[in-house]
Amino acid sequence: MKKVAVISGDIISSTSLVVEDRSALEEKLKDLLKTLDEKWGIYGRLIKGDYLECVCETPGDALRVAMLVKSFVKSYNPKQADNSEDNNRISLFKTHGVRLAIAIGELSRFDPKKGVIDGEAVYLAGRLINQSSSSHGKERVVIKNTLFFTSHNEVLNEQMEPVMRLLDVLMSKSTARQSEVLFWKLFGLTELEIAKKLEISQSVVNQHSTSVGWNSIEKTVAYFNKTIK
């Protein structure tokens, strides 16, 4: 049976967003998943508004897709909440955005038209996400890591763990605008095209690109693709 990559993810502190922000983010994520399907043939679905699953039939594409999702969510800038407790959780959302787990494995059933995804890859990715979530409802949240990788190859897992941790650190420090620039870079746009799209100068795009660590991220995505192949 052919191995694929499944990416599972949940939005951090989504329940603290005001209703308008939560609804807007949900619609934007649906549009993103549709775009990923149109451009790369990546099937994705959104469950209950804040949990997503993507299937990469070419496993080497998984890190690029995960970073596209990560940078997309981080580029979203929500309103402040009505109380300090929720504002603290919103600051966690702005820092971390979304937890994502990449799992390489088999799928026993996969029917995009019917929205069916079933098999070990789904279970592996989902288990990692559940293990990484340390809160429910309004309880205190402690975020350690938000990017994970797993497979049945322990050597590969050991190789990928520092990769995920380093990308995690870079993304946790990125601003919403830097994340937006990173998203379009990962999407394949040139700095001039990004400048026109965001209505800023090319030099500002270059500054954001440098600040977010684009050169390192680009090489890491390429390394992942080559290694997984």
Image (cartoon, rainbow, N blue to C red):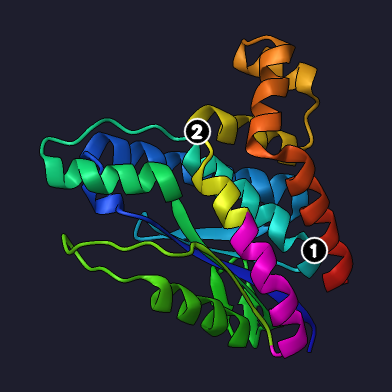
Relative image position of residue 152 (x, y in whole percent): 70, 90
Relative image position of residue 57 (x, y in whole percent): 76, 69
Residue type at tag 2: Thr
Helix, strand, or loop for circle 2?
A: loop
Residue at (68, 83) in percent of width and height: 151
Q: Please indicate whether residue 197 sits to the left or right of residue 188 in the image.
A: left
Q: Is residue 33 visible?
A: no
Q: Quadrant of the C terminus?
A: bottom right
Relative image position of residue 209 (x, y in whole percent): 69, 30
Q: Main secondary structure of the magenta part?
A: helix
Mark number displayed over residue 224: 1
Task: Write down the residue under mark 2.
Answer: 175
Residue at (56, 53) in percent of width and height: 169
Relative image position of residue 226 (x, y in whole percent): 89, 65
Q: Is residue 20 visible?
A: yes
For marks 2 and 1, give the one nearer the viewer. Answer: 2
Q: Quadrant of the N terminus?
A: bottom right
Mark number displayed over residue 193: none
Q: Please indicate whether residue 182 sits to the left or right of residue 138 in the image.
A: right
The residues tagged by marks 2 and 1 sit, at their Cα atoms, a distance apart of 24 Å
Q: Which residue is most to the left?
A: 83
Residue at (84, 55) in percent of width and height: 222
Q: Magenta segment: does it hold 164? A: yes
Q: Earlier in the sequence, mark 2 or mark 1?
A: 2
Residue type at tag 1: Phe
What is the quadrant of residue 118 in the picture? bottom right
Q: Where 138 falls versus 78 (above or below)?
A: below
Q: Nearer the viewer, residue 179 or 41?
A: 179
Q: What is the span of residues highlighted in magenta in the rendered image?
A: 152-166
Q: Where 217 falls versus 130 (above or below)?
A: above
